[in-house]
Amino acid sequence: MGKSKKQLREQYAATEAAKANNVQLETCNDAYTSGAFKYLRFLVHLLAAAQFSYGIYYHYFNVHWPKGLHEEDELKTRWGGKFKYLTFLDVIIQAIYHTLALLNDLFGDNTLNTASKSKLRIIRDYIFAAFAFPVAHNVCISFWVIYIWDRELIFPTALDAIFPSWLNHVVHTNVALLAIMDLFTCFRRYPSRLAGITGNVSFMLLYIIWMHIVRYFSGQWVYPLLEPLSMPMRYLMLVALLGFNLFCYLLGEVINSIVWEPEFKLLKQQKIKQS
């Protein structure tokens, strides 16, 4: 038995809707993967990778505590080196992320699609979601809030002589600003909530354990503001640090879904029509 006129009309409407969806998706894809948008994304990744790589180099080889410290003070500053600071670990994360993103721009896949087959892009997206975005905003917001409240607790005035202002902004300000710029210029799919939060929380728990190891061997907490606190208040602050980092993860996920909502809708519609 042949199809009724109603069924034919519905089939025709579905076919036309699928064609229109494909045209919209191709238009978005062309705008995203070529032209000014493509070069803007590449420029963000190139400048960020270069900036953070140089920041790591300068921080590690040119920023040193004053000579002539007492043996006890020298031990406190030497144990764990720069790697005991979340700020330094974060700038390493940013350099790794933007370098991967730059490599993906050159050799990987940036197309808007339902599922990327580029492993480089999948790794890039996971590092951004679980580590680069949340840790950058945790570091930036925590640092500047405490700095404004009482800078001696986190960045003593004595550091001004050995820690350049430009480097301070690279490691405490630009990490967040460039993560936001990347979020607006780089389409990505966040990992599953479980996978993303597991990586995010695991990183912060390992860092808190590392802080205790440094405290045990050096006799001093990494951050001076932890010294005068009672044990309950100290661990309440560490839990707050962990919780704020998780909040930054969820914030990144929400902003990403809002910024790229039209593209996600088109991809969802295409997936439904293909199934």
Image: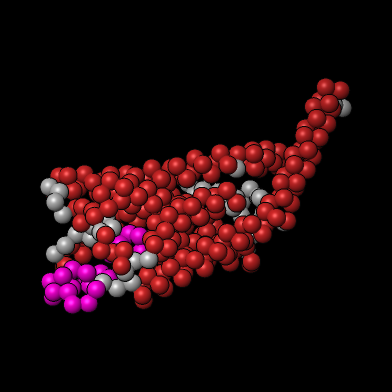
Rendering quarter of residue 168: bottom left
Rendering quarter of residue 8: top right
Q: Position of residue 199 (x, y in %)?
A: 39, 54
Q: Which residues are magenta?
A: 66-89
Image quarter hosting the C terminus: top right
Q: Position of residue 35 (x, y in %)?
A: 73, 56
From the viewer's side, name the closer residue of 125 and 61. Answer: 61
From the viewer's side, name the closer residue of 121 and 154. Answer: 154
| Count of numbered circles in the view | 0
Q: Is residue 100 left or right of residue 247?
A: right
- Can residue 69 be found in the magenta stretch? yes
Residue 53 in view of the camera: yes
- The residue depicted at 46 percent of the width and 71 percent of the height is 54
What kind of secondary structure does the magenta stretch mostly adopt? helix
Residue 268 in view of the camera: no
- The residue depicted at 55 percent of the width and 53 percent of the height is 182
From the viewer's side, name the closer residue of 226 and 5. Answer: 226
Q: Is residue 234 left or right of residue 204?
A: left
Give the answer, above or below, for where 95 lies relative to 227: below
- Can residue 117 be found in the magenta stretch? no
Image quarter hosting the N terminus: top right
- The residue depicted at 31 percent of the width and 69 percent of the height is 162
Rendering quarter of residue 211: bottom left
Q: Is residue 139 left or right of residue 263?
A: left
Q: Position of residue 49 (x, y in %)?
A: 52, 65
